[in-house]
């Protein structure tokens, strides 16, 4: 395989000086984290041997294109390989020179599913027909698969599925809650894909984008037994006041839409391997910071909560370090990951629609609470290169963020009121734009205190 930058052990370029180029230094840490999450090395560690029968590849997620290419490069050239993977529009990486295409990769919409995703899911489920115990199914699963692998349960059409999905995204629900609902309103998620592969052996190779790295939550666990219940899904829908058709509610109440559970014999002998995780990427970034002579403190790779509020908590910690050298001595870098949420505020009459995602909203909450604190810089970005549905990965904050905004008559509270992180940081020239990274281990946040 020619694209050797996919290796997490590839030689990293020298880091910019944190003292002379704080923003460049933080971007370097983000780039190191992303490179560590690319799939080639993780796949190499966990690939099984070719089976007696066929090897069928099924996959979904924002890293699907790069995972498929890595598998094509690693699988023995004389061993049969076929299958279908669906990824987000624009997320298929350039094909390395000389790498033969053995798998089909198609594109669909994320985070709200579309007809292309529905067609891909139908084709993927159809590929499970006729499998035998001599066959091997390799499932390449990464974040974003919940929307990309959409096959609604009976009584739900695509338009209704889109409505429910959008309502979940705007509700502020945690990813585990959203995916519980998605599993029970699907014919392919929540373990159903692997169950359909029986009696073939299924080996799932997954890149985690969820707090806690629970494979049953990543992409709504299409190949993993599901311990949650129809009652859990219904409680979540009621909690966030999201309506469903009467027939669907009845099917949740009577258990018709129940998912395969742990202990189901159809999952016997299956394997699940995490080939990249948020913690691994944070540790790679931490090592890069230490190489530059900066102490590092990794708070957690499992942070959840309202993005702006998580930003305020990080700001309080950064201000304490900057002003008192507690609880950490400076200079230092504070790292964290996880998956925060954004609750969309009601739009005021005449107000422009806000744009942005979790990382940008975190940065607004952080900047507001930092109050222009001297010698504190920050970057927050999604490791897939897309913050929400925009073209930026995230944003950056500097000691002069609020001052520069004030000079443009921009009040950060106004932008927070309409969830318009994109508009705020675009006007300041502080969007972080990377393009698709071809992986996804979720939020990356770094704060530098000098």
Image: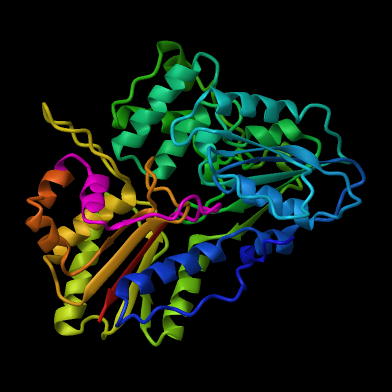
Note whether residue 58 is visible: yes
Say above or below: 423 vs 382: above
In depth, the one of 367 and 437 nearer the eye is: 437
Task: Using the rendered view, name the quadrant where residue 323 is placed.
Answer: bottom left
Task: For the N terminus, give its image quadrant.
Answer: bottom right
Q: Is residue 29 magenta?
A: no
Q: Give the residues in magenta.
A: 417-442
Say above or below: 42 vs 410: below
What number of labels is visible?
0
Percent position (x, y) of residue 377?
Answer: 25, 70
Instruction: From the viewer's perspective, tell me whether residue 102 is left or right of residue 112.
Output: right
At a point 40% along the width and 78% down the height, the residue shown is: 16
In depth, the one of 48 and 241 nearer the eye is: 48
Instruction: From the viewer's perspective, tell me whether residue 128 is left or right of residue 346.
Output: right
Task: For the C terminus, give its image quadrant.
Answer: bottom left
At a point 69% along the width and 31% down the height, the residue shown is: 124
Say above or below: 5 vs 244: below
Instruction: From the viewer's perspective, tell me whether residue 51 is left or right of residue 270.
Output: right
């Amino acid at each position: 395989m020619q694209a050797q930058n996919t290796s997490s052990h590839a030689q990293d370029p020298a880091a910019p000086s944190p003292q002379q180029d704080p923003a460049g230094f933080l971007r370097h840490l983000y780039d190191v984290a992303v490179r560590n999450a690319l799939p080639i090395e993780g796949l190499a560690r966990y690939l099984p041997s070719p089976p007696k029968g066929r090897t069928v590849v099924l996959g979904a997620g924002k890293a699907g294109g790069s995972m498929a290419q890595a598998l094509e490069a690693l699988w023995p050239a004389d061993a049969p390989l076929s299958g279908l993977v669906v990824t987000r529009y624009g997320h298929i990486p350039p094909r390395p020179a000389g790498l033969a295409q053995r798998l089909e990769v198609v594109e669909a919409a994320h985070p709200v599913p579309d007809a292309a995703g529905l067609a891909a899911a139908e084709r993927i489920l159809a590929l499970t027909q006729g499998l035998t115990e001599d066959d091997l199914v390799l499932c390449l699963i990464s974040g974003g698969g919940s929307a990309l692998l959409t096959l609604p349960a009976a009584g739900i059409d695509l338009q209704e599925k889109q409505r429910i999905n959008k309502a979940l995204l705007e509700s502020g629900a945690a990813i585990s809650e959203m995916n519980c609902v998605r599993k029970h309103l699907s014919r392919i998620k929540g373990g159903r894909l692997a169950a359909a592969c029986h009696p073939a052996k299924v080996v799932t190779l997954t890149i985690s984008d969820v707090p806690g790295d629970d494979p049953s939550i990543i992409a709504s666990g299409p190949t993993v037994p599901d311990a949650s219940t129809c009652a859990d899904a219904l409680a979540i829908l009621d909690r966030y006041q999201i309506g469903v058709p009467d027939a669907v509610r009845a099917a949740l109440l009577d258990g018709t839409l129940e998912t395969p559970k742990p202990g189901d014999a159809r999952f016997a002998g299956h394997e699940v391997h995490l080939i990249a995780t948020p913690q691994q990427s944070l540790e790679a970034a931490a090592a890069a910071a230490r190489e530059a002579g900066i102490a590092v403190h990794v708070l957690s790779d499992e942070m959840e909560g309202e993005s702006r509020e998580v930003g305020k908590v990080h700001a309080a910690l950064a201000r304490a370090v900057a002003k008192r050298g507690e609880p950490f001595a400076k200079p230092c870098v504070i790292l964290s990951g996880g998956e925060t949420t954004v609750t969309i505020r009601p739009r005021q009459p005449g107000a422009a629609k806000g744009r942005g995602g979790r990382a940008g909203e975190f940065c607004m909450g952080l900047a507001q609470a930092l109050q222009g604190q001297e010698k504190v810089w920050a970057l927050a970005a999604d490791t897939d290169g897309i913050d929400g549905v925009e073209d930026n990965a995230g944003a950056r904050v500097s000691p002069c963020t609020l001052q520069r905004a004030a000079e443009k008559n921009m009040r950060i509270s106004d932008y927070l009121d309409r969830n318009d992180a994109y508009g705020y940081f675009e006007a300041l020239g502080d969007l972080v734009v990377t393009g698709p990274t071809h992986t996804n281990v979720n939020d990356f946040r770094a704060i530098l205190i000098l």
